[in-house]
Amino acid sequence: MNTPVAYSSVLLVVASLAIGFPAAAHGPSAHPETATAAQDEEAMKAQHARMGIFEEAMTAMGKAMIHGDKADAGDHASQLAEALRGHEKDVPHKNVLRIKEFQALYGEMKKRTVKLAADAGTGDLQKTSLSYGRVLESCASCHAKFRD
């Protein structure tokens, strides 16, 4: 074996370990872009529960509209507005430093949800369906930037 090649290979491996080890040792908490900021685990669980209820109500509302059930659509629209209570303290899963943008999207979703509930209250399923689509649009936009 050629000695200079062996030494340079060993040197390369040692240098790689020396450079990579400190970066791996400090973990994700040093990267605010991937951390959940100051929010604790309980707050994140509450946020997930809220959005789970929201998702269930959206699914049920979609089915109610497909089946022409105006009363059921109205009930689920009310659940949507209720599910958003407390969102003001929520933080995104990623892009944490863009929390103002996240909160603005959440505010827009709330505004659209209120409109959806008002439209569902009229019993006009065509108008309600359009508002429903606008809420879904805000969900997809936010998830693309802050979750998925």
Image (spheres, rainbow, N blue to C red):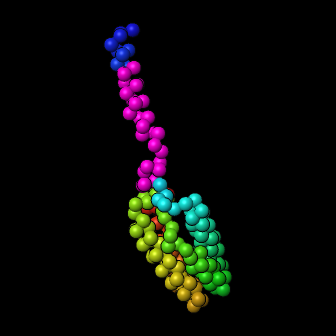
For residue 139, above or below residue 28? below
- Image point (62%, 78%), residue name: 79
Residue 48 visible, this angle: no
As rendered, which of 133 and 112 lies closer to the eye? 112
**Rendering coords of residue 6 (x, y %):** 38, 15
Quarter-of-image position of residue 5: top left
Place of residue 9 in the rendered image (x, y in percent of width and height, measured from the top left): 38, 20
Tell me: 76 left or right of 3: right
Magenta residue check for 23: yes
Residue 74 image offset from top left, x and y in percent? 62, 84
The percent position of residue 82, horizontal first and vertical second, equals 60, 79
Question: Which is more toward the observer, 126 or 57?
Answer: 57
Q: Residue at x 54, y 86 (%)?
A: 119
What residue occupies the far bottom of the structure in this picture? 122
Residue at 40 percent of width and 30 percent of height? 18
The region drawn magenta spans 10-34
Dominant secondary-structure state across the stretch colored magenta: helix
Q: Residue at coordinates 42% horizontally, 30% vertically from top-left? A: 17
Q: Is residue 56 above or below residue 72?
A: above
Figure quadrant of the N terminus: top left
**Magenta region includes residue 3:** no
Q: How many marks?
A: 0
In the current view of this chain or complex, which residue is farthest to the top?
1
- Which residue is situated farthest in the left direction here? 4
7 with respect to 68 (left or right) = left
Any part of residue 97 in sight: yes
Quarter of image, res 53: bottom right
